[in-house]
Amino acid sequence: MEFEADENELKAAGAEVLPDGRRGLRIHGWEIETRKRPILNSLHLQQWEDKLQTSHLPEMVFGDSALALKHMNSSIKIHFNAFDALTGWKQEALPPVEVPAAAKWKFRSKPFQQVILDYDYTFTTPYCGSETVDVNAELGSEVTSEGANCSLHWEECKQEIDLASLASKEPILFYDEVILYEDELADNGVSLLTVKVRVMPSSWFLLLRFWLRVDGVLMRLRDTRMHCVFAEDQSPIILRECCWRESTYQSLSANGYPYDSVAYNDPNIISRMLPVIMRKTQKLKLPGNLSGCN
């Protein structure tokens, strides 16, 4: 779903649409942009496999799709893309989820063979976003935050994102959802990574969600929420909450929930059923200017 406010609402909020046909807004020192492109073709998939040193990728990889939020004064950009997410999957290398039939599925790549799944075929990722600093924005030069002397520092905190305030009647100036990758697990469930962004007159909010359902076996949610309240007279602070929820079908059934996979199609509803495995909240205070970094 895509949504954009009308011109009067944007003007009242001090916002403007991005030029050159790009999707997104400029508002209170931020440039927020979404880009949605087709799935990668076989040539690009092969290039990604070579870079990631793997022979396995999700069925649908939207490699050129992305969400980017750039803080103009500091040149810090927080962005979300499939390659970095799959890099996290490869590095974490979780053991494969045990499935029925001796962990054997027929895969589209080998339709006449049964292959033993000896890798994390769910493509679960610990990814919670990427950060770069455009230290020479006028030259188009971009370096990772880790490579700059002014690297970003997320501090753990007890402050939480006020989700109740986000449910207020404040107008939505811009909303979009970007799919990064998806796999139907050979018709045995779903593995899906998406990022949604919502921009209001007072703040922006996003949800990066990895959603996994292995039918009859396991459900997993890894959510990253970020919220930034616009601040004219002080450096903006971004709150980031990472939450990992997971449960087996057997455990859910023992707690009185249905066993049938049909009951588990909406991750928003399912998140209330799944126990929390890990949760942490961090904050990032953005500097006003990074022009002195080198």
Image (cartoon, rainbow, N blue to C red):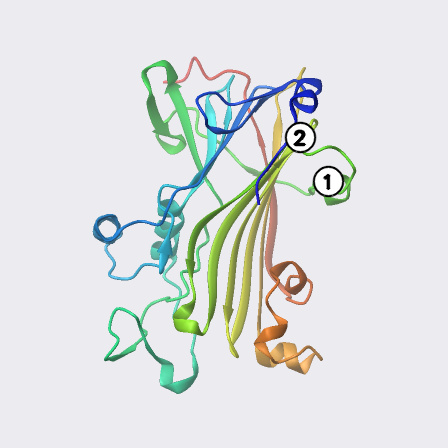
**Mark 2 is on which residue type?**
Ser
Left or right? Give the position of 184 relative to 50: right
How far from the left and from the top, in percent, is residue 195?
52, 46
Q: Tag 1, which secondary structure?
A: helix
Residue that appears at 39% across and 86% down: 101
- Amino acid bearing label 1: Leu
Q: Nearer the viewer, residue 61 or 68?
A: 61
Residue 135 location, quadrant: top left
Mark 1 closeness class: few <14, some 14–19, many ≥20 residues within 10 Å: some
Could you say which quadrant of the image residue 183 lies in? bottom left
Task: Determine whether 272 is above or below 260 in the image.
Answer: above
126 left or right of 230 in image: left
- Where, quadrant-wise, is the C terminus in this rendering? top left
Tell me the quarter of the image containing the N terminus.
top right
- Residue drawn at point x = 42 percent, y = 65 percent: 122
Q: In the rendered view, would you say 196 is above or below 270?
A: above
**Does label 2 or label 1 sit earlier along the sequence?**
1
The reply to whether dot 2 and dot 1 touch (C-beta < 8 Å) is: yes
The residue that mark 1 highlights is 166
- Mark 2 lies on a secondary structure that is strand
Q: Which residue is drawn at 34% across and 25% down?
A: 142
Q: Foreground: 99 or 8?
A: 8
Mark 2 crowd level (few <14, some 14–19, many ≥20, 10 Å Cα): some
**Mark 2–mark 1 distance (CA, rounded to whole Å):** 9 Å
The tally of labels here is 2
Report the front residue among 64 and 82.
64
Residue 255 pos. (x, y %): 70, 78
Q: Position of residue 246 (x, y in %)?
A: 57, 66
Q: Which residue is drawn at 67% across and 31% down?
A: 200
Q: Name the residue under label 2.
A: 203
